């Protein structure tokens, strides 16, 4: 069985990754001792290091050393850290207050809420009664076998879908269905129409109904379910004190566009970058930390002249793909996907739209899931905030004969939390030839620990030089000193947490001042002089 097969993401079980993350202290369910809280996660000692490494790398590549632009000069990007709670007018202007919601249908039987556009997906993939009822159709033609459906309704159906119209009143439902089939023999109903019939007790009064995936009851009209978390400010609580936890970091940047212009020397084109928490009351948080209710984003708004937006849009699409490659994601697992016209956000401009950087997660494979969106937002946000706040947000461009214009915006908006998940999935390698059975092959730059110092035994002649080496290295690198347990177990632990190098201090160290370096990926060992270890690590970190 080759390594390629093992790295096939459709073969990796997410449960194993989640278990490793908990076992080794990367990610825990939030409020674990109280049974957790759906959609919330805590980053453990190693998870927070990994997350910080990814965040710091993004900050460095955006703000500290921004990319070189198409004309060969370095770009100007400045940083920001805005409040999570802003004046509620922000969300009126941004469109979130009216538009940021999912359509939900409520079951009249059991009260279950279903997202309208996910209903048939849920029915066909994870509804027990739907699957069971489907078995009662003619196996070859898929035709309707009324006596079988009738007996299903009186047996299994009663248990699995007690609120389904077919179960409550099989004679009436099946006679409606027969009328439909006989009435239009040239246009037989498809599966969805058949199941709508099975969910409909009073066809003449209600029309066809949609069934609840849990109990078969009828679903009501879809109503918007707001995704923003609400809170209150101040002591007096009422409609006027209502505030919202931000659902994205981007708006804090637009609100500060004028402040940054007035207080710094940045000139068009330039960017403002921000990393921080965002909150969305997601209807169905799932796939580990991929879709949470509290998560972190890394967003940059790039302001430019409208005539140059198309050029910058292409520039940032290419940059962002290259960046994800540079932190260790492989080309094969990244897909750049242009949004279809019908999924374009309200701000998407002039058909330029949005391109997503997608990653082949184990739970999406062979498909992909969004990691980052690079969006052309036009002047939507600045124009909205200008209209709602009454503050002039236009730019006076002295380099263009004092032309006044509303800048256009290109926004690379990445998920830090999702990025961490992608790094972990990418790094997860099954290897039956080592005691841990698995290792994480993070790049040295992303790895939470760069090296472990392991004295072969707990004897002073091993521990003392090991401690000396540790004290010297820890000034410049995140390193571990691990003394207890047999060496095999200690290697296994370092493999599972993705430490690229282990330095072992043994009897030869005492004799000739060299240590063994074990490479995590190849498990090869070589000896280097103790006083060259820092240089060795420095070299590897660069590569
Ligand atoms: P999705 O379609 O997956 O809900 P989105 O298109 O709404 O995502 P954006 O509003 O473009 O996402 O947010 C930018 C980035 O923030 C996304 O690419 C993703 O990495 C991250 N993100 C968005 N929602 C969540 C969430 N619920 N949990 C974790 N990360 C998220």
Image (cartoon, rainbow, N blue to C red):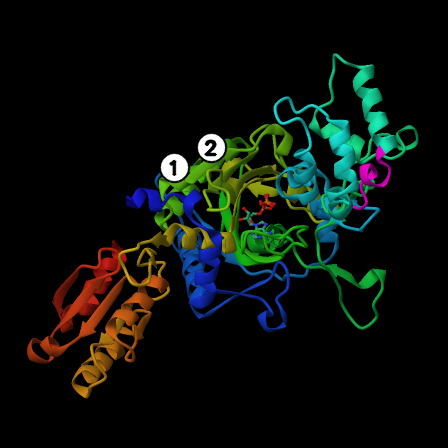
Q: Residue furthest bottom?
A: 460
Q: Where does the image place residue 105, in percent across and percent down from the top left?
A: 78, 43
Residue in the foreground of this view, choosing between 413 and 34: 34
Against 91, residue 219 (above or below) is above
Residue plotted at (34% across, 42% down): 5
Residue plotted at (73% across, 26% down): 145
Q: Which residue is mark 1?
A: 70
Residue plotted at (21% across, 79% down): 466
Residue in the foreground of this view, choosing between 212 and 308: 212
Magenta span contains residue 398: no
Magenta span contains residue 163: yes
Q: Earlier in the sequence, mark 2 or mark 1?
A: 1
Q: Where does the image place residue 356, in percent across and percent down from the top left?
A: 51, 39
Q: The N terminus lies in which quarter of the figure?
A: top left
Q: Which residue is mark 2?
A: 311
Q: Where does the image place residue 22, in percent across and percent down from the top left?
A: 47, 65
SS under mark 1 = loop
Residue segment shown in magenta: 162-170
The picture quadrant where one finds residue 404 is: top right
């Amino acid at each position: 069985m080759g390594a390629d097969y093992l790295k096939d993401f459709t073969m990796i079980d997410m449960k194993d990754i989640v278990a490793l993350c908990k076992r080794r202290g990367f990610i825990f369910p939030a409020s674990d001792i109280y049974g957790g809280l759906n959609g919330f996660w805590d980053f453990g000692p190693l998870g927070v290091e990994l997350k910080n490494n990814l965040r710091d790398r993004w900050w460095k590549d955006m703000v500290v050393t921004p990319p070189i632009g198409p004309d060969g000069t370095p770009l100007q990007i400045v940083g920001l850290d805005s409040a999570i709670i802003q004046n509620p007018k922000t969300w009126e202007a941004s469109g979130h207050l009216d538009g940021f919601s999912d359509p939900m249908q409520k079951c009249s039987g059991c009260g279950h809420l279903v997202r309208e556009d996910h209903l048939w997906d849920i029915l066909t993939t994870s509804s027990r009664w739907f699957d069971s009822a489907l078995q009662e159709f003619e196996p070859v033609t898929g035709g309707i076998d009324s006596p079988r459906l009738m007996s299903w309704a009186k047996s299994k159906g009663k248990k699995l879908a007690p609120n389904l119209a077919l179960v409550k009143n099989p004679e009436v439902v099946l006679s409606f269905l027969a009328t439909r089939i006989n009435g239009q023999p040239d246009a037989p109903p498809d599966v969805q129409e058949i199941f709508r019939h099975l969910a409909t007790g009073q066809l003449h009064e209600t029309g066809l109904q949609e069934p609840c995936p849990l109990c078969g009851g009828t679903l009501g009209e879809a109503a918007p379910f707001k995704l923003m978390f609400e809170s209150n400010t101040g002591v007096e609580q009422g409609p006027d004190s209502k505030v919202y936890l931000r659902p994205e970091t981007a708006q804090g940047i637009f609100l500060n566009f004028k402040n940054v212009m007035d207080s710094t020397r940045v000139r068009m084109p330039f960017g403002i970058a921000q990393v921080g928490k965002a909150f969305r009351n997601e209807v169905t948080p799932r796939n580990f930390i991929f879709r949470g209710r509290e998560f972190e984003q890394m967003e940059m708004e790039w302001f430019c002249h409208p005539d140059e937006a198309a050029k910058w849009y292409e520039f940032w699409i290419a940059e962002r793909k290259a960046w994800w490659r540079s932190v260790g994601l492989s080309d094969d697992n990244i897909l750049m996907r242009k949004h279809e016209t019908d999924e374009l956000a309200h701000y998407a401009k002039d058909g330029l739209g949005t391109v997503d950087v997608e990653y082949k997660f184990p739970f999406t494979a062979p498909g992909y899931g969004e990691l980052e969106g690079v969006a052309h937002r036009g002047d939507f946000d600045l124009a909205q905030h200008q209209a709602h706040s009454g503050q002039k947000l236009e730019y006076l461009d002295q380099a263009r004969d004092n032309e006044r214009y509303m800048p256009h915006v290109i926004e690379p908006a990445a998920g830090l939390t999702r990025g961490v998940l992608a790094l972990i999935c990418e790094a997860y390698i099954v290897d039956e030839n080592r005691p841990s059975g698995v290792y994480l092959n993070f790049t040295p730059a992303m790895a939470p620990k760069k090296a472990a110092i392991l004295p072969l035994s707990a004897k002073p002649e091993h521990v003392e030089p090991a401690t000396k080496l540790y004290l010297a290295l820890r000034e410049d690198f995140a390193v571990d000193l691990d003394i207890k347990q047999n060496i095999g177990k200690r290697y296994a632990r370092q493999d599972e947490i993705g430490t690229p190098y282990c330095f072992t201090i043994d009897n030869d160290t005492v004799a000739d001042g060299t240590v063994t370096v074990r490479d995590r990926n190849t498990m090869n060992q070589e000896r280097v002089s103790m006083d060259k270890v820092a240089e060795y690590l420095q070299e590897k970190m660069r590569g």
